[in-house]
Image: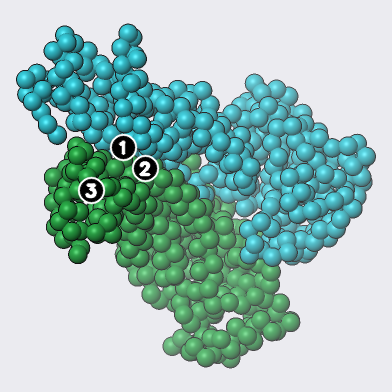
Amino acid sequence: MILPLSYNLRNLAVRRTTTLMTALGIGLTVAVLAASFALVDGLRLALEASGHPLHVLVTRKGADSELVSNFERRVFNDLKFKPGIARNAKGEPLASLEVVTAINLASIEFPEGANVTVRGVTPIGVELRDDARLVEGRWFTPGRREATVGRLIAQRYPEARPGRKLRFGRGEWEVVGVYDSPQMARNSEILVDLNQVAADFGREEVLSSALLRATDEVAHQALINELEADPRLNVRARSEKEYYAQQTSSGDLIRYLGTVVAAIMAVGSCFAAMNTMYAAVARRSREIGTLRVLGYSRAAILASFLLESLLLAALGGVLGILLVLPVNGLTTGIGSFTTFTEIAFQLRITPQTMAASLVFALLMGGAGGLLPAWQAARKEILTALREG
Amino acid sequence: MKYLPLVWKNAWRNRRRTLLTISSLAVSLCLLGVMMALYYALFIGGQPTKSQTRRVVVRHKVSLTFPMPLHYREKIAQVPGVEEVMVMQWFGGVYKDSRDQRNFFARMAAEADKLFRIYQDYRISDAEKEAFIRDPAGCVVNRVLAERHGFRVGDRILIKGDIFPFDLDLTVRGIYSSDELDDETLWFNWKYLENMLRNSPRLAAGTFLVLVRSEEEVPAVCRAIDAMFANSEAPTKSEGEFTFGMSFLSFLGNVKVILMSICFAVTFTVLLITANTMAMSVRERVREVGILRTLGFQKTAVVGLILGESALIAIAGGAIGVLLAQGLCFVIRQGPLIVQQTKTLAIEPPVLAALMVVSLLVGVLSSVAPAVSAARQNIVDALRFTD
């Protein structure tokens, strides 16, 4: 015979304050875990959504990122007519020579300044970014000192809003537009004219990278293989998606911190749950005796108290998730150890995080409820009836 | 005070509950302690080490990734108050396999003869120092770093270049330690870069490290240097080495907000746990309160008894928590070098005081409601009360 679930639910409802306080304690613990996961997931999702499946990023061999890559114009001229590279309407190959550098800008979140990527591109480079759409102003004019910035840059850095002027290189750059790309990482970049910025930094011949678009998926892989194998070029070619995916390691520290903090808090919450359940057992001593007289087995009593503790924890888990839901969609930034610049992203609470949070809460409930339930089950009928 | 034995006895009436509450508080307050210690070390009370106070880092104003011309060195040396100027360059590169995080450590080029004059806290034997200065392909490594990778004097270290278009083939000429902070850095001779980058525009300074005559002169020296280059091709930003280190913090995300939220969540949890215990404890003894009142205890005395009990439990939890937190800080000090503050993390007196105040407040706040309601109860009702 198993005790009905409503018995547990009513018991929890009768001791509302205690139930709520214990559940909230568990909920806060869950919230810390879920919030750290939301940060890490937000970063991961932003980076996973970045990179075009047909794009190939070419850097100097040995360079882990575009910022540290020295890519010669001569090499670019050698590779832009390789077979497998798509062409635009005018018949030009969709190959973009780019230069990447970083500048320090004060943001709303970090007034002392954070590093931001500045990327010099040619009109072909803008064409390759065809999924980006202008939300304000226009694209920069080639040959002029103008900049078009990503949506997250305009949002986070007051100095980089349309109409303002940025100071770097050998002078000022006017911000003329804002673009928004479904590829989140792109929204953390400032795009300017390649030749202007290369001249400013004395990098006319030694640039950073090339971005190529393959005609189709088969050509994409073939192009990577061919570039990698060409000893004259001495370049590293990889898919653009892979390049962004490797940057997720920036979130490792936060994931680690969040997990450790939540684990320690869990120990505290476990003890609290134990307290509550012990009190429940002590208070219901007579009731337990009566149930046993009615024929409920020790196992049924054990299961019932454990279940009650799990219900308590589940309530806590739900409260925790509700508490943390408002952070969903908040924008923050983190440094990428690959590019040495800031990537902005939005916190994301995924269904997996919610599930993991509930499981985590149930684990706390289980660990906290086991000993009290065991004690309840072990009570001798007569002593139990006499107690209380 | 005379009620102390009574408070004590009451606290122990349900031994298991009290112990569980104290353990729960101790664990949570330990966490709060470490988070507060981190916050304090990073944003409030972090202090530069003794030799650090005289060191100034000069970098390109726009970004650390931009180089500055080498001739700045001579100009900086002319600034009054400057004792020594050293050119430094971050080499980056790959040691063995970059996918393994442990293989990441700072690899810096610096003028060998000046290194130990500027870092006065470095300890190295004279023989090793001389060998390092003489060898244009020599390097010195920090003791902690050497132990981790098993580097010994005479070993060769290969670093694949990524920022720079060549690889390093270095010989370990010495192993240094520091009285103050083991910075886990590999320093190699600047001459190596000079030889590899002859006539290349890439031969430039990443940063200049300046030793100032005295701590008091640091702000003036910083201002003088920045003013000197304000209108040149590469404007500079000069700041104390400690402040410079802090600028890497934003790299880890919004640390301030993260730490604050954790502190808030933990404090609130602790409050809930204690409040719950006290509510349970008071509910159990309504009758007892009735008896106390008939014996002539005033309402205030009853409130005091209950508040005192709660405060006692909370402070016990807090005290154990502080001890645990000290232990956890010790563990963190052994961990990897992320920012220099984690290497000296400890529960400083202000953090200790704050923790004890939080404990006491939690103890009092959590029991106000149950204590007042118990004291207000009509004596007859209380005596008749059966739970």
Left or right side of A287 for A88: right
Q: Is mark 2 on a helix, strand or loop?
A: helix
Identity of the residue furthest to the front in this view: A382
Label 2 neighbour load within 10 Å: few <14, some 14-19, many 20+: many
Q: Residue A347: which quarter of the image?
A: bottom left
Chain A drawn in what color?
Answer: green
In the rendered structure, the residue with mark 2 lies on which chain? A
Q: Which residue is drawn at 34% across and 15% down?
A: B5
Chain B drawn in what color?
Answer: cyan
Measure the alpha-carbon separation of dots 2 and 1: 9 Å
Q: Name the residue under label 1.
A: B273
Measure the alpha-carbon separation of dots 3 and 1: 32 Å
In the rendered structure, the residue with mark 3 lies on which chain? A
Relative height, residue A136 to residue A28 (above, below): below
Q: For residue A381, which numbered disc appears in the image?
A: 3
Left or right side of A292 for A25: right
Give how far across and how far down residue A103 sits, in percent: 53, 52
* Front label number (2 vs 1): 2
Identity of the amino acid at label 3? Ile
Closer-to-camera residue (B200/A208): A208
Q: Name the residue under label 2.
A: A271
Q: Residue at x 64, y 62 (%)?
A: B100
Q: Which of marks 3 and 2 is nearer the N terminus?
A: 2
Q: For residue A7, which numbered disc appears in the image?
A: none
Identity of the amino acid at label 2? Phe
Relative height, residue A119 to residue B250 (above, below): below
Identity of the amino acid at label 1? Ile
Total labels drawn: 3
Q: What element carries label 1?
A: helix
